[in-house]
Image: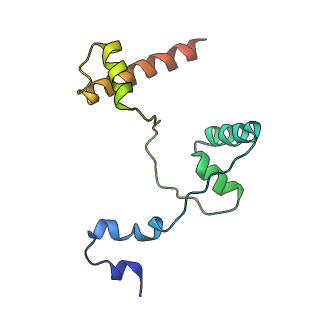
Amino acid sequence: MSEEKKSPNLPKKWQGANKAIKATQVAFDMDEKIQYQIRKQALEEGVSPSDQIRHILGLPCTRRPKRPRLTVSLSPDDYELLAVKYGIESSKQLDIKKVVVQELTQFAQHREED
């Protein structure tokens, strides 16, 4: 019997995630130069480093479109610092996020000009 049939309480759209839930994330400690080459190749091919590793290992990769995004973990203290920097209340995290996106966009545009 499949896991999907064993989980009738899950919403239908989540039942397909049971298989993914059983996957285990594996971290590899490698020389910085090796990591750089894998990340660089992934960037050049427009895939995630994880998909690049799967490709190198001959494993299947999902080809569904992914939102291009960058992530960073921000603590409450980080929000406080950004709030002061941007003159926004620290509780207005969405407003802070919008200004951060603007700052990162400006950074990238200036780098392109160099």
Task: Please state, as top left, top right, bottom left or bottom right, where the N terminus lies in the image.
Answer: bottom left
In the picture as drawn, the residue positioned furthest to the bottom comes out as 1
x and y percent of residue 77 in the render? 36, 26
Q: Is residue 103 above or below residue 35?
A: above
Quadrant in which residue 102 is drawn: top left
Q: Position of residue 69 (x, y in %)?
A: 45, 38
Give the left or right position of residue 62, taking residue 42 as reference: left
* Residue drawn at point x = 42 percent, y = 83 percent: 2
Q: Position of residue 28 (x, y in %)?
A: 67, 51
Residue shown at 54%/62% (left/top)? 24
Asked if residue 66 is positioned above or below residue 83 in the image, the reply reads below
Left or right: where 38 falls relative to 16? right
> Residue pushed farthest front?
77
Q: What residue is drawn where x is 46% and y is 47%?
A: 66
Question: In this image, 87 relative to 3: left or right?
Answer: left
Q: Position of residue 67 (x, y in %)?
A: 43, 43
Q: Nearer the viewer, residue 13 or 75?
A: 75
Q: Is the residue 114 above or below the residue 23 in the image?
A: above
> Which of the 4 image quadrants contains residue 26?
bottom right
Camera-side residue of 80 and 10: 80
Residue at screen point 46% across, 34% down: 72
Q: Considering the image in quadrants, where does the C terminus appear?
A: top right
Q: In the rendered view, tell whether residue 14 sits above or below residue 55.
A: below
